[in-house]
Image (cartoon, rainbow, N blue to C red):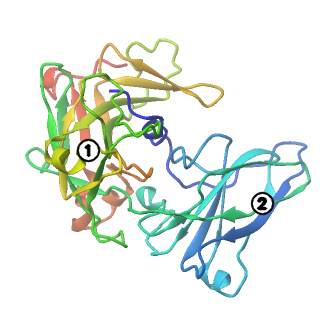
Amino acid sequence: MNPSRLALSACLLVLGGCPQEGGPGLQAGRLEGQVQGPGAPRGDAYVFLFAPGEGPPGGPAEPRYVTAVPEMRWASGDPRYQFAEVVPGPYRLWGFLDTNGDADLSVDVLAQPGAGDWTPEAAVELEVPVAGRVEQDLALTRRMRHGPPAFRVTGEGTDGGVVTVPDSVLSLTSLTVEADGLGLLRGEEARFFVRLRDADGDGTADDLNGDGLPELFPQFFLRFVPRPGQTVPGASDGGVDQVIVPLLINPVPFVTVLQGDVTREASAASVQLFVVPQAQAVSVEADGGQVLMPLPAIPVGEYQLWALSAEGAFWYVPNVLGSQNSESLRSQALRFQIVRGGSPDAGNPIR
């Protein structure tokens, strides 16, 4: 299974960051403009500057600069944003209007738009000149239908805080994930919104691996989190940025509703996932393109479980919420380990 470019981009760093330092001998530039939203906007608007080719709508990434237009100032008739000290160079401008007040830039999985929030139709590519000023408005015209695919993993093996998955191709590992907004997401009931994947927009469901089964959103995958000194088997050049292990949604409960129609959508409180025992290395080229490389072995070690919706919203476990001293958020601290031959004591041969 080849996950979409969107899913692979979501493996990168989530929103959150700070201004970068200016380069020697370069006079900072200035970027400002108006945030244009719906008729009577409610909520705070966040504006981000990313490196070229990074960030939404292609996937979350770490912004170089962040600013905001508070609701109070916007309501008073002043929707202007401003980046006063910007290192000259090319950037991607993007932002969103948080209508429900559930965005939190200090929490990894909450630093994104949710149900009912407004985003641009596309990011804006621009250039900030040396000691110059750029005027660029940002129009928020696309409304998010659904929020992030927040979830918790249920069932046998989750009570101990660590889920182990054998790396053997002879083992069939399944996980059950339940939609759970944790009382933090607003705007709709927490559900998974399942639909057929149609990345090229040709009206036909995608079947990237040619197995005769259409692929579904949300997409789920395990993302390798290497410990210091760990390397990836089969990646001798060291140029691998990410390693993922795909998971497949059990499609049986959704066949009747979707009926092969890419415009249809089914909602579910939970989904069953099957681990595909094939790791893939994801390398980012100089031009921002990505290369997938099947690995001869699945790296043993720690992983995150990611979910990505058709709108590009994401969630993963473990996340920052799991570190809070709250019983209701304990599910967000669940860890995932891939072990050699199904034995947690087999050791980690990746050095």
Q: Residues within 10 Å of mark 2 (few under 14, many from 20)?
A: some
**Residue 332 is at least partly visible in this image:** no
Drawn side of residue 283 relative to residue 188, left or right = right
Kindly identify which numbered label has been placed on residue 21: none
Query: Mark 1: few, some, or many residues within 10 Å (few <14, many ≥20)?
Result: some
Residue 92 on image: x %, y %: 68, 48
Looking at the image, residue 179 sits to the left or right of residue 342; the answer is right
What residue sits right under mark 1 in the picture?
Answer: 335
* Disc on the earlier residue, 2 or 1: 2
Tell me the element at label 2: loop
What element does badge 1 sit on? strand
* Percent position of residue 116, x then y: 44, 69
Question: Most extreme residue toward the left, as rendered?
Answer: 156
Identify the residue under disc 2: 136
**CA separation in Å, label 2 and label 1:** 43 Å
Q: Residue at x 64, y 69 (%)?
A: 68
